[in-house]
Image (cartoon, rainbow, N blue to C red):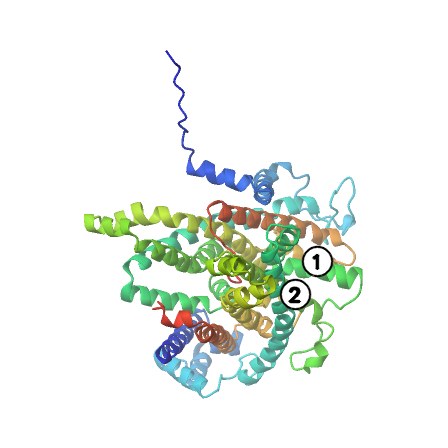
């Protein structure tokens, strides 16, 4: 009796395949490493920071790096290492909550309007165009002037405004699918609209939304840190990269460490997100190079 | 063809109208109005009433909107609450400065981006492509205030080559912005070049893989001719839209860079106006920025229609 050998391959999960796709590219591996390290540091930072972030010490103002203060101290004598480790938390919380929300509502509306087309679609697209023709910072500042600038204002606001371009992406991705035979077949079978969206369209639009989400993350982070750099984000003494960089700019000539530490931390995170997003786009076979500025 | 022209223009006009209505509503919802801004602490009781009467603020919103809109169409943007000057003059001064910044950036950035885009596409996945594409990701994604801070640190504090800040006032002659304008132009060029470069690169790659290029190769057309005659015209056409978006961005949204370098442009003025609650100015700037955005994109669309006969026959959906 011969031993039967099966050449049957266990199908790997989609998630596993995509992750392998990202990590197998050097840029993707580096990107993912940067993001994961940053997130882990942000999570554990309250337990590992050497000093209290708000303790002011007039004796050690703008001291250079030393064994006590590895990255020196800032203009109020606070430890720069401590504040840099903690400084990404607000930005990351905002990014990680606002991005999924933006993708969710923008995606839903985009798929729906792409599917029903007609007058509803016309109206939605005109409003989208009108919103997109205003610079993001003007829209954000108007809301901040109206409601203040805590993260409970910033999260819904960012989620709202950054969901608008997602409508376009989801709509375009839906258009590419709607004309296919299997959607017509589903219609002919009498599937409900909701079930067509869920079973026929969503699986095909999900890749585009995923890539869009990864990309939105970096823009969200950019928006949040820019706002706090301009003084419209978190309020002091909460440590925040944007705010730290704004403060340190005046002392750049005498104490570059106070500004360079948050600059490097923020840059590494953003570069990490973008390398990951690029690798993700390539792994699922999409090209994100065509997108416009912000 | 002519119908398509009209259709696009019509859509643009509708968008601008929607924006103006949106901005008006947003400003309407903002707590406080022109009178509370003018009177400040005294904004109570009879004086507030009188002021509102005088400025016509107690008329219904729809009437105020239409009077405002008609005035704008006549070219009158109203007066600033902050200093009582004509907004049209104030905004024009800054718009001129922003135009200077944008023009220099475009002159530097567009040729650079197209050149590098073609280079990276033709040397795909080899050293020049890997280096330039990675740098592009860096330039594109690092927030402008971060790259600006780094450049100021390196070139004005450390090396002392160029000033790190613009000291000229908004109404100063354009020549007085040099050499302070160099660093802002460099920062903007970095961001812009990266975006256009990526678009050009992916277009060129796509075209080079197409059947008619394969055909040209097979029938023995010289490489130079293939690139210059067959590939580039088709590859650069879609880049027009990306360039248009960049121009719109440069003319309206470079708030952070203008703020960092203290450049007296439109974006800087916008933030100041919002902080000062100078609502008529906010309205005016928003309207101008949106009009520029719609106008530039419209121009790109029409140019695309003009240069690409294929688009004309396609039934395009809005």
Distance Cα–Cα, label 2 vs label 1: 12 Å
Q: Quadrant of the N terminus of chain B?
A: bottom left
Q: Nearer the viewer, mark 2 or mark 1?
A: 1
Q: Residue at (32%, 67%) from the top-left corner? A: A122
Of the numbered discs in the image, which one, if any, rests on residue A68? none
- Category of crowding for the residue at label 1, using alpha-carbon neighbours closer than 10 angstroms: few (below 14), some (14–19), many (at least 20): many
Q: Using the rendered image of the protein, determine whether residue A48 is visible from the camera's viewpoint.
A: yes
- Left or right position of B283 against B178: left
Q: Locate residue A274, reporting x and y percent.
A: 56, 50
From the viewer's side, name the closer residue of A133 and A228: A133
Q: How many marks?
A: 2
Residue B166 pos. (x, y %): 70, 72
Q: Are marks 2 and 1 in contact (CB under 8 Å)?
A: no
Observer-nearest residue: B92 or B99? B99
Q: Is residue A246 visible?
A: no
Residue sitting at x 37%, y 80%: B2
Q: Considering only vertical position in the picture, is B259 above or below B76?
A: above
Q: Nearer the viewer, residue A292 or A219?
A: A292
The front one of B25 and B227 is B227
Pick out the residue farthest to the top: A1
Residue furthest front in the image: B219
Q: Position of residue B67 (x, y in %)?
A: 39, 84
Outermost bottom residue: B74
Residue B299 percent coordinates (x, y) = 47, 76
Q: Secondary structure at mark 1?
A: helix
Q: Residues within 10 Å of mark 2 (few under 14, many from 20)?
A: many
The residue tagged 1 is B150
Query: Quadrant location of residue A29?
Result: top right
Label 1 is found on which chain of the structure? Answer: B
Image mark for residue B260: 2
Q: Chain of mark 2?
A: B
């Amino acid at each position: 009796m011969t031993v039967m050998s099966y050449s049957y391959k266990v199908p790997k999960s989609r998630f596993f395949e995509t992750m392998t796709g990202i990590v197998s590219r050097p840029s993707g591996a580096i990107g993912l490493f940067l993001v994961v390290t940053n997130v882990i540091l942000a999570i554990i930072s309250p337990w590992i920071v050497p000093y209290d972030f708000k303790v002011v010490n007039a004796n050690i103002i703008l001291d250079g790096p030393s064994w006590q203060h590895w990255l020196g101290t800032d203009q109020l004598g606070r430890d720069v290492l401590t504040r840099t480790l903690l400084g990404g938390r607000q930005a990351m919380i905002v990014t990680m909550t606002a991005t999924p929300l933006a993708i969710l509502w923008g995606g839903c509306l985009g798929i729906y309007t792409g599917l029903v087309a007609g007058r509803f679609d016309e109206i939605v697209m005109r409003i989208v165009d009108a919103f997109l023709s205003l610079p993001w910072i003007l829209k954000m500042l108007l809301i901040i002037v109206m409601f203040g600038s805590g993260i409970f204002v910033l999260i819904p606001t960012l989620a709202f405004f950054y969901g608008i371009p997602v409508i376009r992406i989801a709509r375009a991705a839906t258009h590419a699918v709607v004309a296919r035979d299997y959607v017509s077949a589903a219609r002919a079978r009498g599937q409900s609209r909701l079930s067509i969206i869920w079973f026929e369209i969503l699986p095909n639009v999900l890749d585009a939304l995923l890539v869009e989400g990864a990309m939105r993350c970096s823009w969200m982070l950019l928006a949040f840190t820019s706002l706090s750099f301009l003084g419209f984000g978190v309020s002091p003494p909460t440590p925040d990269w944007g705010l730290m960089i704004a403060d340190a700019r005046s002392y750049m000539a005498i104490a570059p460490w106070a500004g360079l530490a948050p600059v490097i931390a923020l840059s590494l995170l953003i570069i990490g997100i973008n390398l990951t997003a690029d690798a993700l786009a390539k792994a699922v076979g999409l090209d994100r190079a065509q997108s416009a500025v912000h | 063809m002519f119908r398509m022209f009209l259709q696009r223009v019509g859509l643009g006009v509708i968008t601008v109208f929607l924006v103006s209505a949106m901005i008006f509503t947003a400003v309407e919802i903002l707590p406080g109005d022109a009178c509370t801004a003018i009177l400040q602490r005294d904004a109570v009781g009879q004086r507030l009433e009188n002021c509102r009467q005088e400025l016509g603020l107690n008329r219904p919103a729809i009437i105020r909107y239409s009077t405002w809109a008609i005035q704008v169409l006549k070219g009158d943007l109203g007066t600033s609450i902050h200093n009582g000057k004509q907004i049209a003059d104030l905004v024009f001064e800054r718009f001129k400065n922003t135009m200077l910044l944008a023009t220099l950036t475009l002159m530097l950035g567009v040729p650079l981006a197209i050149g590098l885009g073609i280079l990276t596409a033709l040397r795909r996945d080899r050293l020049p492509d890997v280096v330039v594409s990675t740098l592009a990701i860096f330039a594109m994604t690092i927030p402008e205030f971060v790259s600006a801070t780094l450049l100021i640190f390196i070139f004005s504090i450390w090396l002392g080559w160029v000033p790190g800040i613009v000291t000229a006032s908004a109404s100063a002659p354009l020549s007085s912005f040099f050499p302070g304008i160099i660093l802002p132009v460099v920062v903007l060029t970095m961001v812009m070049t990266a975006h256009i470069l990526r678009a050009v690169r992916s277009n060129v790659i796509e075209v080079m893989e197409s059947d008619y290029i394969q055909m040209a190769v097979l029938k023995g057309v010289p490489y130079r001719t293939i690139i210059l005659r067959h590939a580039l015209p088709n590859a650069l056409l879609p880049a027009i839209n990306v360039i248009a978006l960049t121009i719109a961005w440069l003319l309206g949204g470079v708030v952070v860079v203008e703020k960092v370098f203290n450049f007296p442009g439109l974006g800087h003025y916008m933030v100041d106006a919002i902080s000062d609650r100078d609502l008529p100015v906010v309205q005016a700037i928003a309207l101008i920025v949106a009009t520029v955005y719609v106008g530039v994109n419209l121009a790109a669309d029409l140019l695309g229609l003009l240069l690409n006969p294929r688009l004309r026959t396609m039934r395009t959906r809005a």
